[in-house]
Amino acid sequence: MTRPFLLRRPLARLLLRLVRWRTVGEVPSKGVLVGAPHTSNWDWVLTLLLAWDSRVTIRLLVKKEFFKGPIGWVLRSTGAVPLDRANPGGTIRELIADAETDETFLLGIAAEGTRSKGEYWKSGFYRISQQTGLPITLAFVDKLTRRVGWGPTFPLTGDVSADMDRIREFYADKTGLKPEQTTEPRLKEEGPA
């Protein structure tokens, strides 16, 4: 284990204790992490602390516009990957290639795609899981219980409605930092609620 990893866990635990949040769940060794609800920039901070407490690095997709100046360096050093949302194919292809060779590959995606309330989730997590055969892990932030954690890990079946029903059931009792900004877990492929 490298020196930064030795320092990250105690730092994460100290910071989480100071803000009265705790981590829960079992970290997967490999998979596509679906992070929700995503309603605030603080979600990234809590997810980073979860990863450090779990001694893992999450390759978190972040829109490329955030990678300017010093914040870009911070994002890259914590595992964030710049994503051009107008043309995500190249980044995704590189990540899929990494997934085939890395023993511990965790790709984090905020499926809501934005911190604002929307009509549908983005389906990138679903497509990546299907293309790679990687299971998904439902990661979460819950303001009411002050927990950030790892939920269940499971392979997608290809039955979009059934898979999304399972996802909706898990997130039904999770509350984002700004609850009014939460987008219901629903893909365009399912049609309206």
Image: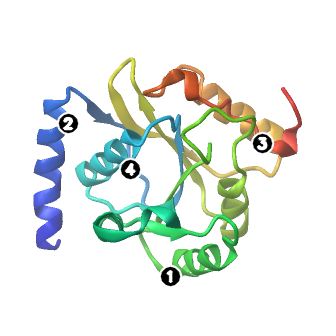
Q: Which mark is residue 187?
A: 3
Among the 4 quarters of the image, the one containing residue 88: bottom right
User: Which quadrant of the rendered structure holds the C terminus?
Assistant: top right
Residue 30 in view, yes or no: no
Q: Position of residue 51 (x, y in %)?
A: 32, 52
Inter-mark Cα distance, 4 to 3? 26 Å
Q: Earlier in the sequence, mark 2 or mark 3?
A: 2
Query: Mark 1 touching mark 2, by CB under 8 A?
Result: no
Residue type indicated by callout 2: Leu
Q: Which mark is residue 101?
A: 1
Among the 4 quarters of the image, the one containing residue 170: top right
Inter-mark Cα distance, 1 to 4? 19 Å
- Give above or below for 117 relative to 96: above
- Mark 4 lies on residue: 27
Q: Earlier in the sequence, mark 4 or mark 3?
A: 4
Q: Earlier in the sequence, mark 3 or mark 1?
A: 1
Closest to the observer: 78 or 56?
78
